[in-house]
Image (spheres, rainbow, N blue to C red):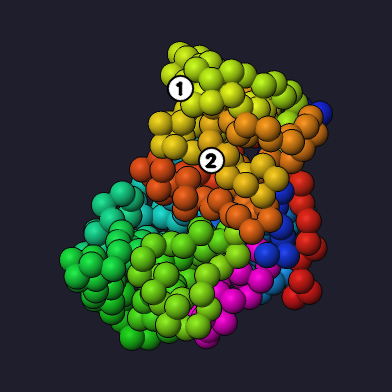
Amino acid sequence: MASGAAGSFRPAWAAVDLGALGRNVATLCEVVRPAALCAVVKADGYGHGAAPVASAALAAGASCLAVALVEEAIELREAGIAQPVLLLSEPPADALDAAVAAGVTLTVYTPETILRLGAAARRAATTVSVHLKVDTGMHRVGAAPAALVALAAAVDEEAGLGLEGVWTHLAVADGAGDDDRDYTRAQLDRFDDARSRLGGSRTPGLVLHAANSAGAIAWPRARYDLVRCGIALYGPSPGPAATAALADLGIGRLEPVLSLRARVVAVRTLGAGERPSYGRLRPLPEESVVATVPLGYADGVPRALFDGGFEVLVGGRRCPLAGMVTMDQILVDCGPNATVTVGDEVVLLGSQGDEEITADEWASRLGTISYEVLCGVGPRVPRRYTGPPPPG
């Protein structure tokens, strides 16, 4: 888990509000009802801590969990989480026995994996639930729609496997443009056509799912029986289509769950024209108080933020970086005569006073997405959890 003891002595931390996450889950459950919600907690819960996030999401109404790796599923089991866990891609052949032992629901889409998984189920004398994934246009992993019937038959031939679900993944459900919407419609059409080939008596017993966070919010048609929400659990917008849909529902926005904070470890006054940090890239425009803050690019604060004009919050004010981000620290230009002292709190992500810096703001400055920002908060940054999950 991300809250390793190795980082516990640094005056820097990521605060994770599990109450906010629980409220986001409850909101999403209401939006997608009667579909169930699967909480995606891969990549250490998008940097928030997989096991605490999973427990909070389940307590707030999620029916199951999803991860990318067998190791991630085992971590949840070792944390005492017994609810269903869906693996989102086929695992390597040498991981199948471990996945079966952990009681993971497996995604499959090739005949070879179906055969190997059947053998693993026989070795364990158990039945493994599987979901078939169909590639309707993401073109990452999944079976061609025309292969679905044959793959379902292959699953049926393996006594140790039980076909529980069929699913696909939407490539541009987050987009609001006409091309994006047309492509999403085409993907859903392909999915509907593929599942219809299984026969009317078969499909009512299967769990059908297609929607990621954006699809769950912006595409009612894509909800089927289950939606897989990842980024929306953690607060950032899944994209313009979802932002507009939430506004139409009167929700506004989901709550940010993670904030990144640290305490000032050094303060010095530097004269006009001084150029702090590596490369001496920025002359101070006037005499200024410069604070050293113990977070750097090894913790997920990219060097590119300096070029992007990044600011942090000190005393409820936005203050720019005084120089290039270093591996372990940043330097902050707090301005002339600033009353900043060692121990003062600095916010890189989150709120302080009336100001707020969001993951979406970081993403905009970096030319990326909020997913990458949150997943980038490094494992040596301790996570501090607040807000117990609401009762289920």
Q: Quadrant of residue 39?
A: bottom right
Residues 247 and 147: in front is 247
Magenta segment, principal secondary structure? helix
* Residue 77 in picture, x, y percent from top left: 71, 51
Q: Is residue 97 above or below residue 268?
A: below
Q: Amino acid at mark 2?
A: Glu
Q: Earlier in the sequence, mark 2 or mark 1?
A: 1
Of discs 2 and 1, which sits in the foreground?
A: 1
Residues 22 and 308: in front is 308
Can residue 166 be seen in this snapshot? no
Query: What is the distance, in whole Å, between disc 2 and disc 1 at their CAs?
Result: 14 Å
At x 23%, y 67%, the residue is: 177
**Residue position for label 2:** 311
Q: Is residue 80 above or below residue 25?
A: above
At x 59%, y 76%, the residue is: 27
* Residue 270 in picture, x, y percent from top left: 62, 19
Q: Let me know if residue 39 is in the magenta part.
A: no
Q: Is residue 290 above or below residue 311?
A: above
- The crowding category of the residue bearing disc 2, from other C-alpha atoms within 10 Å (few below 14, some 14 to 19, many at least 20), is many
Left/right placement of residue 312 relative to residue 112 reads right
* Residue 350 in picture, x, y percent from top left: 62, 51
Q: Let me know if residue 33 is in the magenta part.
A: yes
**Residue position for label 1:** 282
At x 47%, y 53%, the residue is: 360
Q: Secondary structure at mark 1?
A: loop
Q: Residue furthest top?
A: 279
Left/right placement of residue 125 relative to residue 155 reads right
Write down the region rendered in magenta: 21-38
- Quarter of the figure that contains the C terminus: bottom right
Number of marks present in the image shown: 2
Left/right placement of residue 225 relative to residue 74 reads left
